[in-house]
Amino acid sequence: MGRPIRFLLNGEVRELADVAPTDTVLNWLRYEARQTGTKEGCAEGDCGACTVALAELDDGHVRFRAVNACILFLPMLDGKALFTVEALARDGALHPVQQAMVDQHGSQCGFCTPGFVMSLYAHQRQGARADTATLKDALAGNLCRCTGYGPILAAGQAMGPDPDAADLPALAEALAAIRPDEPLEINHRGARFSAPRSLAELAAAIEARPDAVILAGGTDVGLWVTKQHRALPDIISLNEVAELNAIEDPGGAIRIGAGVRYVDAHGPLTALHPEFGALLRRLGGLQVRNLGAVCANIANGSPIGDMPPALIAAGATLVLRRGQATRTLPLEDYFLAYGKQDRARGEFVEAVIVPKPPAGQVFRLFKLSKRFDQDISAVCAAFAITVQDGAVITARIAFGGMAATPKRALATEAALMGQPWTETGVTLAAEALAEDFQPISDMRASAGYRLTAAQNLLIKTFLEADQPSAQRLLQVEALAPRSLAHG
Amino acid sequence: MADSGAATRGLPSVAAAIAHDSAERHVAGSAPYIDDIPEPPGLIHLHVGQGGRAHARVTRLDLTATRGASGVIAVLTAADIPGKNDISPFAGDDPMFADGEVRYQGQPLFAVAAETLPKARAAAALAMVEYEDLPALLTIAQARAADSVIEPAQVMALGDAPAAIAAAPQRLEGRIAIGGQEHFYLEGQVSLVIPGEDGDLHVWSSTQHPTETQHVIARTLGCRDNAVTVEVRRMGGGFGGKETQSVHYAAIAALAARKTGRPAKVRLDRDDDMAMTGKRHDFEIGWSVGFDDSGRLAGATFDLASRCGHSTDLSMAINDRAMFHADNAYSLGAARIVSHRLRTHTVSNTAFRGFGGPQGMMGIERAMDAIALSLGKDPLDVRKANLYGVAGETTPYGQVVTDSVALELMEELEEGCAYRARRAAIAEWNGANRILKRGLALTPVKFGISFTTKHLNQAGALVHVYTDGSIHLNHGGTEMGQGLNIKVAQVVADEFQVPLNSVKITSTRTDKVPNTSATAASSGSDLNGMAAQDAARRIKARLIDFAARAFSCDERDVAFTLAGVCAGGVEMTFRELVNRAYLDRVSLAATGFYRTPEIHYDRATHKGRPFYYFAYGAAASEVVIDTLTGESRILRVDILHDVGRSLNPAVDLGQIEGGFIQGAGWLTTEELVFDPAGRLATHSPSTYKIPTAGDRPDAFNIRIWPGGVNREPTIHRSKAVGEPPLMLAISVFSALTDAVASVGRHTVMPHLDAPATPERVLAAVEDVRRRSGSQ
């Protein structure tokens, strides 16, 4: 039922009729299209072995994103151009990205290699910088167990600019040419998938089908299928709604629509405060940030999402819509209990409004995890504290990973208010965190560590308030580096 | 030459930095792994049903609904196994399917064969299983208390260590717990079995051990070895995790193929793979040392306890290797090493790069740091003073160390990385910084090379020369990314002096080279390189004999060069020579064989010469910790490593860097967490964190030691490189210890267990603060 999905696979138009809405792009590539260069390493978007490049039109320009094919549903390809590792070599000659990987000895067992090649390819086609720091960011979502990464980073630096930049207008035309006239609507053996194109249609669909799963980037929902093996009989995608893919900046605050990806929110949020940028940089790998939506990280109510504590501390408000009606509420009030949010049937998150932290405010965000990149926080902390005449006059403090929901530390805030902004004052106030939170022990950290670290983070916020960021762990460099190789 | 071309591969020079033989296919996605092989018609897909208790009697296993589910073709249990229900390498204690009793969470209980994998999985979920719980031993402590072991404790001794320690001017003791490690090969366990005529089976398996796969399949099916052919072209990573553990799933696929007559595939999903397959052993080590005021050891004792899991697997040899490396590069004086091998109700732990060696070394390296702290010395000075060649030569197992280059490596590295200047700069920096603290450590590695089970030190190869001058190369080793195939091809090309692209690398098959050992113990190029060289030399000798006859010259006047072959002044291409030899009815195919000489070992007394030689390396790591959160970063690493005369520096550098980062992951971010019911809580990459690109320090200087040469006549005097570099990462752990110790002004030895997660580092910092009275 419904029209076929239509997309470009390595430059050629493909139309697929009668696809199951939750079939993954990876399984289709490997077992239907018999393009087995793309590998499955984990089927949950955490290893990058299945990385492919997705191109779409963005304001008339072609935009490339590295994404994980393992948790990407086939209908999400509709109207887009998919590039796999098979597309890169031309006339028997390796693509410069591939050649650089060979020249730098970037493959050992080779299983992760196509994913790295595609991450580098997408990076190159986006015209992004190829310095080590940028490459480490671009490759944080790709795991390699053999090389230690040095040769792959060297390949990234050696790959040069996009050799096909001149073809971009043609690709833009091809993308425009395949854009379907009709919104996608699939009915497949009782499973339904709808991708309305206007906010009004989306709102009407969600109101009419309140049990439908609302799909944004699928970086969480995809795992319901690949890991929990759940059947999702009804899906409504908000990805084609242009109104929701916008960030509005009326001044003093930004409004992030429900479809806005982390990667697109990064710039505007960083402009609000660099702490947002530093935190977003560590949220998932780039493949996840390329698809995942800021609002979805809120909407699903996870107690360990990284965005909610930061946004709560900043005083963000949430816009919810049901049909024609909208309402707003302070973000912290959205999280009622574990798995329970203040969202009525038929209602959905339309946007989040994030105010700019005022100048002079101490605004710090922390993410504690076993690994720096692409890890889930054991503790996520956000501090927004204003000091006047040596005393605290406002304090908004929020934590993730400390309770069943993202939560403000109200007792600690109260303990700080009016107190001197001194190490003694802060250390005393930090004790109130034990009133605010009774965290659990799990595979990420013990309850004891969570509480101690949370208290220390408040003290750290004080101690580092006036320090340059170079004093922070991630900015520290080796002392007087001198290369052994050249020494 | 007739065979020029493919210049990208370079000329056939041993010691050239040549790309991996599959590199161009890796990057193009055209190097097929087993799941990429076009699925044969009628293929059935298997899902393995897992036991849901750590230790329990299975009181009911009702698979009626499973059998009746959509798409199900067969359901297999222990009762369906025609041969022996045992997939163990030798001990006979590891069933294919649990039969009446489950002994770890995730143990295979049955398998469902269906038309598709989702159908097999869905059907498996319909199984009705009931249990009667039995007491479960999950931890080292529990198993020790219950005296649950896979074999009696082993003792290795040199002199009277307790007396030597008691008589020493200074004494220290300590304990450390070291977590296990998941292999996280990117390609999970996978096997594809295709039935042939007369009950024969062709098995494609991602395995480091085709021969054992063959043996176990024959054993479980009750057929002869010659009915089973196992083939592997490449693995998407192994690291020891496919030495025995792969065999289990190949055998299940073979059983399904035998039962149904259809091709059968088992491919474990990541979570299943992590839950069901063994890992690096976790250890608890107690150590005590006696030493003089200069830090020189008089004696040392080690109490090693490891969690072996529910079955023996390779745990005996792994724990032996831990004992062999309890000294690392140091002469301990008198030594007593006691090793407890504990049987628990957890997954059977197995081989993992280093094979117990890394864990064994951790005890003595902790002791070195503790001695230095107690004497107020730089740990590097204590380490150097105790090296073999400086302090003594005899290992606790009686082998005399005659080839130690550890001191040369350490001193060259010390100078090259400006260790002393940085030590001073770090002390100054730490004095000026309250929250962040740096640490620095330079540690050596000495790793024994040879299988400690003597008979495994053999290898075979098969070389064919075709009449067009092209060469077909086959050997018993398997390619898991370590570059074995390219190294062996270089050896063969070098023998014939032909371009490397004349040598076709082919998949490892039990019907070409039989009775092989696992590709393990870093031995791949040592053993198979020699066997292939032997095969090539046999053919070459026949060619020389022929050429001398054909061109009426002395055999000494037949020369193979890159420009061609010259016989008595007559020049011809290799192809021409080969073609002439063929017409003269000269055999152009040969098998080659190698067995490592001179090694011997008496396991009853733990004495002998188990190792043909030792591989050495040294690493200096600088780290920084956050004393408020316990987070840490590796800032700079300098490595000087001895690979003998490198067969391929590009491959060797890759092994060094990759091994180091893998070792650093083991000791920092990679934490296996089991819940109280014995279930692995960290069963996917979302919760189990191997290093990413961002964890690699920007300042990372790796150098192959230019002075390296193997004193033994190994293949082109090279040294094994697969495992030793992993243990260079112990320098990271020592550097973290140094950083934590700085919180107490280096007055107390931190209690730090591995992996050094933020939580453990923070706990160590707070403990040091308390014990040292520092703020």
Image (cartoon, coloured by chain):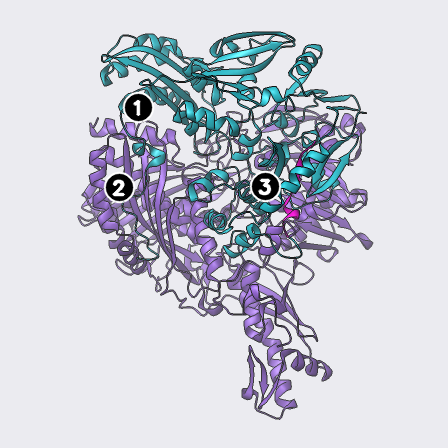
Chain colours: A cyan, B purple
Q: Residue at x 54, y 11 (%)?
A: A319
Per the rendered image, the range of residues in magenta is: A79-89
Q: Residue at x 27, y 57 (%)?
A: B411
Give the quadrant of the C terminus of chain B. top left
Numbered label attached to residue B100 = none
Q: Amino acid at mark 3?
A: Ala
Q: Is residue A85 magenta?
A: yes
Numbered label attached to residue B370 = 2
Mark 1 or 2: the one toward you: 1
Q: Secondary structure at mark 2?
A: helix
Query: Residue B406 lies in what quarter of the image?
Result: bottom left
- Residue A39 visible, this orientation: yes
Identify the residue under disc 1: A460
Chain at numbered mark 3 = A
Identify the residue under disc 3: A49
In depth, the one of B439 and B110 nearer the eye is B439
- The percent coordinates of residue A21 (x first, y second) are 72, 27
Mark 1 vs mark 3: same chain?
yes
